[in-house]
Structures are given as structure tokens and as C-alpha cells.
Amino acid sequence: MDEAEFDPIHFPAPSRTEPAKLYLIGPQHVGGGFPDRLKAALEPGLAAAFQLRVKDVDEHELARLAEPLQRICSDADVAFIVNDSISLAKRIGADGVHLGQSDGDVREARALLGTSAQIGRTCHDSRHLAMEAGEQGADYVAFGAFYPTTTKPSEYRPEPSILTWWSTVFEIPCVAIGGIAADNAGPLVRAGADFLAVCQAVWGNSDPAAAVRAFDDVLASSS
């Protein structure tokens, strides 16, 4: 399908069968008391996934850190996703892996992790990359950063209309990422984001459960 054929500005907001959900991105430090903070963040029932995103730590240590977090996610029926590393996802039996553009091939991940794995792909502000990911068998595509972010600074600034275009044309879910908080998430949900990836808005709060509940109204408005 030729991306040039579609002008998302002319598309109405896509209809939904389910409300949007949160996709929690973990902080750099997930040891110590973090498992309790994760458990609290999942209690409101607004998150569908948690991504382990820890940089500059060897795979053995990451596997150790992942164990209690993976158990908490399983108990809450929340998908446990590993960032970047197909090998770690395979090693610990994660629910899936999220791949940046330089982190491996979607088809390779599928072959190693199996048909039930949830494989996501970062697509920045590119319709072409998103369509390519879909053709390769990705289970979701991620666009962003929509707002300035310190978690993973990005030069890309897609317009919310890319979410409308994607959600109207394709059935594969899309994730909005980058600087998202409860007070700026509305336009992304209305544009068609199936999931809001949030990090600092939750983990930067002393009460992660309250931080998650702050998204309740905007998520409910998507149904």
C-alpha cells in the first residue's frame, strides 16, 4: 500500500472496540524497592504491558532483575516486554520484545520467540517504516516522540494525525510514545493511539498508583 495515497488529516477518528490502555516503560533502575512500585502501578488495571528497558547491564544481571518484575506482570495479566534484546526475551520466556530500528529483524525475532510472542517496532515518524514492520509481522508499531522527553531524547516529532492514518488503514495496534502525561495524552488518544507509552509520568511520582489513575479519564474517553 502506497503511503502517498492517504492523507490522515481527512480521516475521522477511528472507531474502537476497546478503550486505549497504558504501556508502562520501566526506568533505568528496577532493583531495590521497584518491584513494589510496579505492583502498585498495575493495581488500577489500566496498563496492558510493561517494558523492561535497562541500559548498560549484562544479560545475566538483567535476567536476575527481570524475575520478580515478570512474576508481578504475570499475576496482573500484563504483558512483560523486553527492550532491544531478542536473546534476553528468549532466555527468560518474556511475552515479547520491542525492537528499535537497529535492534534486529522482526522476522528473526518471530523465528526465535515463536508465534505467540508480541513483537513491537519503533517507527519514529515514518509511515514507510510502520508499513514495513507490519509486512514483516510486527504485532504493534510505535510512533514518537510526540512530546519532548528526557527518557529517550528524540529528534522525531510526528503529528498525531499519523495515529489516525494508521488506525484507520491498518488493524495492527499503534503505540504513542514520548513525553506523554495525563494532561497531554488527550490528543493522542483521540487521534487513535491504542496504547500510551509512559515512563517518567508514572515513575517520577512518589505514588505510582495515583499517577496511573490520573490517566483514567483520558483512557475512558477513548471507548
Image (cartoon, rainbow, N blue to C red):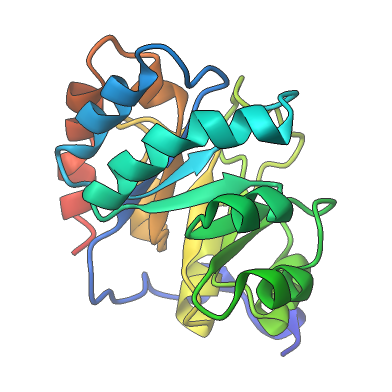
Asked if 27 appears above or below 125 in the picture, the reply is: above
For the question of whether residue 151 can be seen, the reply is yes
Q: Position of residue 162 (x, y in %)?
A: 58, 62
Q: Which residue is at a point 63% across and 27% down the rendered structure image?
A: 61
Q: Quadrant of the C terminus?
A: bottom left
For the question of whether residue 160 can be seen, the reply is no
Q: Position of residue 166 (x, y in %)?
A: 54, 72
Q: Which residue is at a point 61% across and 19% down the rendered structure image?
A: 150
Residue 197 appears left or right of 131 = left
Q: Position of residue 67 (x, y in %)?
A: 45, 37
Asked if 169 appears above or below 70 in the picture, the reply is: below
Q: How many marks?
A: 0
Judge by depth and name the residue closer to the eye, 141 or 105.
105
Asked if 217 appears above or below 203 in the picture, the reply is: below
Q: Position of residue 157 (x, y in %)?
A: 67, 42
Judge by depth and name the residue closer to the eye, 127 or 33.
33
Q: Which residue is at a point 44% across and 50% down the rendered structure image?
A: 80
Q: Quadrant of the N terminus?
A: bottom right
Residue 184 appears left or right of 7 = left
Judge by depth and name the residue closer to the eye, 12 or 42.
42
